[in-house]
Image (cartoon, coloured by chain):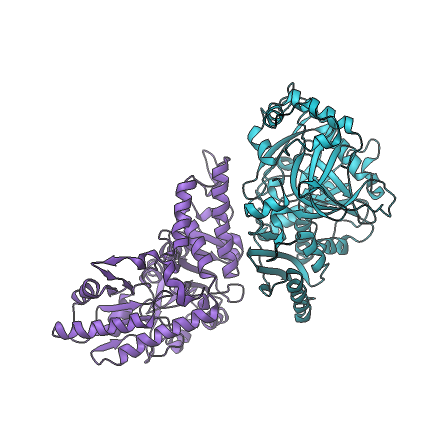
Amino acid sequence: MGIENSRVDFPVLERLIDGQSITYLDSAATALKPRSVIDAMSDYYSQSGVNIHRGKYYLSEEASDAYERVRYSIAQYLGAYGNEIVFTKGTTEALNLVAYGLDLKEDDVVVGFLDSHHAQLLPWRRYANLQLVGLNSEGGIDLDHYRELLKLKPKVVVLTHCSNVSGTIAPIEQMAEEAKKACDAIVVVDAAQSIPHPHLRIDVSKTPVDFVAFSGHKMLGPTGVGCLYGKSAVLNTLRPLMLGGGMVDWVDADGSQERKIPHRFEAGTPPIASTLGLGAALTYLKQFSVQESLEHTETLTKAIIDGALKRDYLELLGTKSVKNRCAIGSLRIHGCDDLSDIARSLSDSYGIMCRTGHMCAQPVVDDQMGGEILRISAYIYNTTEEIERFYLALDELVSFLGL
Amino acid sequence: MMNSNFKQVQEEITYSYENTVFFRKHMEQAGLVPEDIIEPNDFLRIPPTVKKNYRQNFPAGVIASGYNLKSPHVMRFQSSGTEGDRLVSVVLSYDLARRQASCISVNPKFSSLWKPGLKLRTCRFAAPNCSDVECANPNSTMDSRMLPDGTLVLPVYHDLLTTPDRMINMALDEIEEYDPHLLFVDPTHFAFLIRAMKKLGRVPHKKSGFCIMSGYTLCTQVARRQIKECFGEEVAFADMLGMSELGYLGFECPHGKQHMNTEDYHLEFIHNGRAAKPGELAELLITTLDDKLSPHIRYATGDMFRLSDEPCSCGDPTPIVRAEGRVKNALWRLDNTVVTPKELDELIGPAPWIDMYQMNQTDDDQFNFQYLKNENWTQQAEDDLLARLRDTLRSNNVSCSPTEYFPADRGGKFISCVSSVAMREEKRRLLSWV
C-alpha cells in the first residue's frame, strides 16, 4: 500500500461533523492515528494492562518484552544502539533533560536558531548564554550568521531539523560537521517535525550529532511518549532529570547506585500503552519508501506555496521553494489581526481543521509576520485537493468577513 | 525410534504415571494406562507433551513424589525462552553429569575434561538469562557470579552489542585470572567478545590447553570462523546440542558431525505424525530414561532435525543428525515449503566479510537480511549472497544491507534467523506439536 491510499487507515477521517467530512491540516501539531496504533494500545489494555520490568509473572514479562522491542526498533531506525534510546514524555522533556543534564554554566555559549520551537529555546536560555542565528532574506537559515556565532566556541549547538512554522529543513549534517570542526560542540537536534517523514530520517551512525529529540504523536503515534537519542559516550555523562523507582540498581540509607543507560533516565512507570503505540506507528511508517515520502511531501508543499503566492491578501512565512521544505504553510492575512474567527469558520463551515497563534515559536513569528499566523500543515493522509479546498474556503471567508 | 531398549521406555512411562500428577492426568485424558503400552507402536498413542505442560505444572505436577526443590542433588534451571515461552525445570546433578559424559564421549579432544580428580573450572559467556546470577549488572563481582559447580559466569549486557568496554575488559581479565579448562559459550556472544578484544588491542589469554564448547543458539559458520581464527587448531572446539530442561542431547565429533545421545534418552524424529525417513525434516520428541526427578515422556522440543542413516566417518556408532533450528524460526516460502535456519546458514557459509547476521522474515514473501560487515566486504560478495538468498527463498522480495547494530532479544539471546510467519499457529502446526 502506498501513501496515496493511506487515508483509509485513519478512522477519524471517516467521521462526519454536522454531516461534513474532516479536512485535517494540523499535523505539525499532532498527527492522526492509524488503526494499527489504536489497536496496539487497545490490545495492551484489553489483554494485559500490567506494569513492566521487575515483574516475574507472565504478563509482566510479555509487556516488558514488547516495550523493549520498541526501543530496539527505534534504535535500528536511527542507526543507533539500543542503550542510546531514552523514552521521554516527548520532545520537550527530552530537550529539557539534555539542557539540565549537561551541567552548563551561565556563561557557557549555546548557539540556537530564531525559528526554533520554544522547547529548543527556553531550556537553553535558562541554563546558559543562548545566542540565536537569524534568518536570511529568503526566510531560510542564515548560515553566514551561524558561522559567525560558531567563532564564539559554543559548548552546545541546538539545531532544529525542520521548523514548525516555516517548514524549512535545515542542512543539519553540514551544520553539525561545522560545529564539530569549529569547537567540537555538543550537537542537539530537535527532530520533532522531521522524524514523521521517512525521507528525513536521521542516521546517527553517519551524522555527527550527539542528541536527537522527537515525539511519538507527530509521527502517527500516541501522545505522552517521545524519545531522546544520545550518543552513549555523552549520554553516560548526562545528569538524570528525574529520580525515583526504576532508575537505580541499589539504594540504602546513605546513598544509591544509578542504573546503566538508558534506564537511569526513566524513573517511574512509563506510558506503556503509548510506547507500544509508538512501536506500531514506526512499523506503519516504515512501509513507505524514502522516494514516495519525498514526492508526496513535495507535491503537498507545492500546493501550499502556489496557493499562497496566487493570493495577494496572503503572505507566506519562509522560503518559497518546494525543495528542503515540509508541507507547512504559516500565513498572514493582510488586514486581519484576529485570526480566530477565520479558524473557527474554516472548521465549522468547511470542516477544515487548522491552527492560529504563534505556534510556540513566537520570536520568528513576530519577527517575520508581526503577529499571529494561520498555519496549515499536511501529512501522508492529505491531498492537494484538500489544500486547494482550504484556499477556496479562505477566499470565500475573506470576502464575507470584509477583509 | 532411536532406542532399542523399549523396556526402559515402558519403565519410564510407568514411573512417570505413578509418580507425577501431570503425566497421570495426561494419560487419563488420552484414555490410557501404562499397561496399554505393550509394543513400540503403542507408544505413539501417547499424545506428545510440550513445554507449556511443564510450565503450567511446575513444580507440583512435574516433580516426582518423594522429591522437592531442596532434595539432595536437585539443580534448578531457568529458561527465558522467547516470545514468553519461559520455563523453570529441575534435573538431578548426577543425571546431568551422566548425560554430559555420554554426549562428550564422541569427541576425544574433550577427554581432558574428564581426568580423574580434576576440579573442572568452567567460564560461561552467554546471554544473561542463561544463568540465575546477575551477570548483566556492571557492578557484579567474580564471587557473586560463581556457581556452586565451579562455573564462573562472565559479565555481559542483555543487549550484547552495547556491552561497554569496561565489562569486556572485566570478562577478558576474569578468563585470564580463572584460567578455565572449559569455555562454555554462546557462539554469537563469544564471537562478539573476540572482536571487542581485538578492538581493545588485547590478545587471547592462551591458545592451547583448554576447550571451547558452544551452545545456547545455532552456531553460525560466521561465528565459528571467528572463534577458530582467534584460537587456532590447538584449542578443541565443538558445538553441543542441549536444552535447559534436560541438559546435553548431543555433541559434535572431531569430523564435524552431530551425534545424539541415545544412552539417556529415547528419541523420536516425527514428520507429519509418523517416524521420519532419513533426511526428512522432522521434529525431535524426547523421552528421558531413568529420570527419577522430573521424567519427560514424548516431549516435543520444537526443534527440527534431519536424521542420517549413514555411519559417521569418526567411527562412533551413535546416530548422527543435522540440527536445523527452531520451528518458530523457519523461513516460509510462498509455496508453503521452508528454509531452515541451518539451511540459511549453509547458504551464507563462513563469509569472511560478515561478522554477524540476521535474517528476518517480516511477512509472507518479505525477507530482510542484515549483517555487520568487516574490512573484507566487497560489493560483489554482497551481490552474490543476495542472488543466492533470492534463489533459495524463491523470492525477489529479499533485501540485503549492512547495519551497525542488532538488538538481542530481552533474554539476551541473539537469534540469527527470525520469522514472524513461522510464529503463526497454522504454520507451526505443520511442523511441530509445540
Chain in cyan in the render: B
Please indicate, yes or no, whether residue B119 appears anywhere in the rendered image.
Answer: yes
Up/down of B316 relative to B70, above or below: below
Up/down of A20 relative to A68, above or below: below
Quadrant occupied by the C terminus of chain B: top right
The location of residue B339, given as percent across then percent down, is: 66, 54
Q: Which residue ends up furthest to the top in the rendered image? A: B66
The location of residue A68, given as percent across then percent down, is: 49, 48
Please indicate, yes or no, whether residue A241 appears anywhere in the rendered image.
Answer: no
Horizontal side, residue B34 vs residue A190: left or right:
right
Nearer to the camera, B371 or A4: A4
Q: Which residue ends up furthest to the left in the rendered image? A: A402
Horizontal side, residue A55 vs residue A333: left or right:
right
What shade has chain A been given? Answer: purple
Nearer to the camera, B3 or A276: B3
Horizontal side, residue B369 vs residue B184: left or right:
left
Nearer to the camera, B379 or A359: B379
The location of residue A78, given as percent across then percent down, is: 50, 61
Residue at left offset 49%, top offset 66%:
A184
The location of residue A140, given as percent across then percent down, is: 35, 76
